[in-house]
Amino acid sequence: MLGGFGGYLIYIALLMIIPIWAQSKVKNTYKKYSKKATSSYMTGAQVARRILDENGLYDVSIEETKGTLSDHYDPRKKVVRLSTGNFHGQSMAASAVAAHEVGHAIQDAQDYAFLRFRSALVPVANFGSNISFFLIIGGILLNLSGLFLFGIIFMSAAVLFQLVTLPVEFDASNRAMAQLVSSGVIRNNEERETKKVLNAAALTYVAAALVAVAELVRFILMYVAANNE
């Protein structure tokens, strides 16, 4: 019993440590490369505009948004939103983040399959993430295996969203690197450091997916065990 409880505590600790470590890695890497300017001395907004124009995406606008690392692409309004530091910054971090978000705009313009699939999953994933835990806990407390199973199904939708997010984000980063080099924003000797920013950001998505999958597997095993008693 003690071993099982100890193992559970280790499991919970890992679920907490992995995301915290990933976030810390992102913040430290971003902070470091926010202090290093690119050889082109272009701001994030200028980088985004150049790459958009070079890909014929003149209809996509760029806006400044509040917060730190709150950067994102809004496919509904065709807007690349960059946080203040990245909008005005001339650093490797600002260029990397701006190019990454433009990568999503390029995906949108080219009907990238995984992006379309992820967008279609949004309402189901949001609903699943909000209700699944309550259904699972309710199923356990009330000893209702059907309710437990419904919770697992809804959680699966949320986990699927996390998994589909991985190729979307990695592809956007690959596009970002290619565009930064081809557009002359960074030079060959700056590629390695710029890639570190993109790789660090990707860790947060990998960590989120790992945690989501681990939680889903745990509940599936609990469901199987409960129904085999």
Image (cartoon, rainbow, N blue to C red):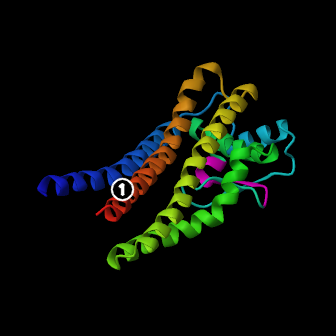
Q: Reply above or below: 195 against 99.
A: above
Quadrant in the picture for residue 161: bottom right
Q: Residue furthest bottom?
A: 142
**In percent of the image, x 62 and y 53: which residue is there?**
71
Q: Is residue 87 left or right of residue 150?
A: right
Classed neighbour count for the residue bearing mark 1: other residues with Cα under 10 Å, few (<14), some (14–19), many (≥20): few
Between 71 and 17, the residue placed more toward the observer is 17
Could you say which quadrant of the image residue 74 lies in? bottom right
Please say whether residue 90 is visible from this viewpoint. Answer: no
Observer-nearest of 27 and 127: 127
Secondary element at image label 1: helix
**Rendered location of residue 216, percent (x, y):** 43, 56
Most extreme residue toward the front is 228
Work out which residue is located at the far top of the displayed protein and give it: 188
Residue to which mark 1 is pinned: 221
Quadrant of the snapshot with the C terminus = bottom left
* Image location (x, y in percent) of residue 26: 46, 44
The magenta-colored residue range is: 77-87
Q: State yes or no: residue 8 in magenta.
A: no
Residue at the image position 70 percent from the left and 41 percent from the top: 103
Q: Residue 73 location, x and y as percent?
A: 69, 53
Does the image show residue 91? yes
Image point 52% across, 63% down: which residue?
A: 153
